Amino acid sequence: MKRNRQASWPFFMIVTLVFLVACQENSSVPKVNESTSSPTVSAVPSVIETPLHSIQPSAPIQTTIPMSSLKTNLVAYNGVVEHIFFHPLIAYPELAFDQDAKSTFYNDWFVTVREFDQILESLYKNHFILIDIRSLYEEKTVDGQKTLARKPLMLPVGMKPLVISVDDLNYYDYMLVNGNVQKLVLDADGNVAAYSITPTGEKKVTRDNEIVPLLDDFVQAHPDFSFQGAKGLIALTGYKGILGYRTQNVTSATYAADKKEAVAVVNRLKETGWTFASHGYAHLDAAQVSYDKFVHDTKQWKAEVEPLIGSTPVYVYPFGSYVVTGSPKYKFLLGSGFQMICAIGPTPSLYVMKDSVIMDRRHIDGIALHTQRDKLLNLFDSNVIIDPIRPSKY
């Protein structure tokens, strides 16, 4: 499908400030506490192995996107930069919405595969184009002093920049039994795919039930949805390892193998346009914890996670709970190498200061789909997007 490249500039109809409950402490809905133990599962189906030959090979994912059609007619873009984020997708709604203790949790904070697919189609039709978050600013030397500045953004005529980020792609224990996939893996062709266990216990490696392979394939089919090969930003914690590999467990018999496999996936993600951010080590509320605990958490992330994914200038606040700019915690983040600091807000915002950049993200989840339709219409119409299988408690 080719999209109409005629410019489209919708007006943001934001009429009231909403309390962001997806990842924020001060809200009317209790915050997500992802460090709690997994719920007890009374019956887990036995595992049925899928023969390797039954895994469908994927099309090669281009490490660089042919940009001949996008290098012409570039113009300076000075408008709003959208940044939206998701949690891992609900691959198996029958497990997520099974009326157990986690069903409301999943209805609030996650989207289904069907919903994500339709959101991508809508974003594409509405002339959005993926960009690398690091392309929004640059470091300059002024009067002998290093300073940050807004980097001119040149885009194809009529296109609007979009950053997509994914939080908690770690696959915590509760996710493994409530409808998410198990981990990211490399498929038979060396591309990033999702490994999952179906509700009937079958092990599968597929490309159709998690954000990374779905977005990879969408850009493969629609290269003009990505500028210079950009995909998304993956914000990782560390207390349960990364990407489904328990790299935090140094006593595990598979520790070395888990690290090796995780790094292989990370490297392929980087090759195909994905970038990484810190989401804190233990998903702590940065505004509420003590300074010493915040410092320890950040150092632990840098000691355990950074060696696996490489250094990153991007820090994504857990719960969207931000610290005061210029406070000791904020200064510690900057001193730890973070320059781009991401929180959560009801509208897009980007502030470039001399020493840091602050960017708000909009949460895309069940709460947003059910209660924030008007605020999201420039992106998609949630009345069209909502999966019929989703509970309608709102």
Image (tube, rainbow, N blue to C red):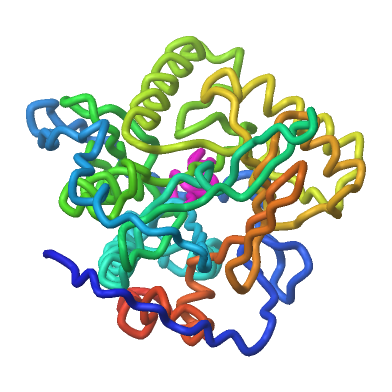
Q: Is residue 393 visible?
A: no
On-image quarter of the N terminus: bottom left
Residue 7 coordinates in the image, percent (x, y): 31, 74
* Quarter residue 350 falls in: bottom right
Judge left or right: residue 104 versus residue 358. Answer: left
Residue drawn 82% across the image and 52% down it: 323
Judge left or right: residue 204 versus residue 59. Answer: right
Q: Is residue 360 visible?
A: yes
Q: From this view, report whether residue 388 is shown above or below residue 266.
A: below
* Quarter residue 269 falls in: top left
Residue 146 coordinates in the image, percent (x, y): 75, 32
Residue drawn 58% across the image and 18% down it: 307
Q: From this view, report whether residue 369 is shown above or below residue 362.
A: below
Residue drawn 46% across the image and 77% down it: 369
The magenta stretch spans residue 172 = yes
Q: Please, which residue is most extreme toward the left here?
A: 53
Q: Which of 177/15 is in front? A: 15
Q: How many marks?
A: 0
The magenta stretch spans residue 311 = no
Residue drawn 53% across the image and 42% down it: 134
Q: Which of 217/327 is in front? A: 327
Q: Which of 83/247 is in front? A: 83
Residue 117 coordinates in the image, percent (x, y): 27, 62
Judge left or right: residue 59 versus residue 183. Answer: left
* Magenta-tinted stretch: 165-177
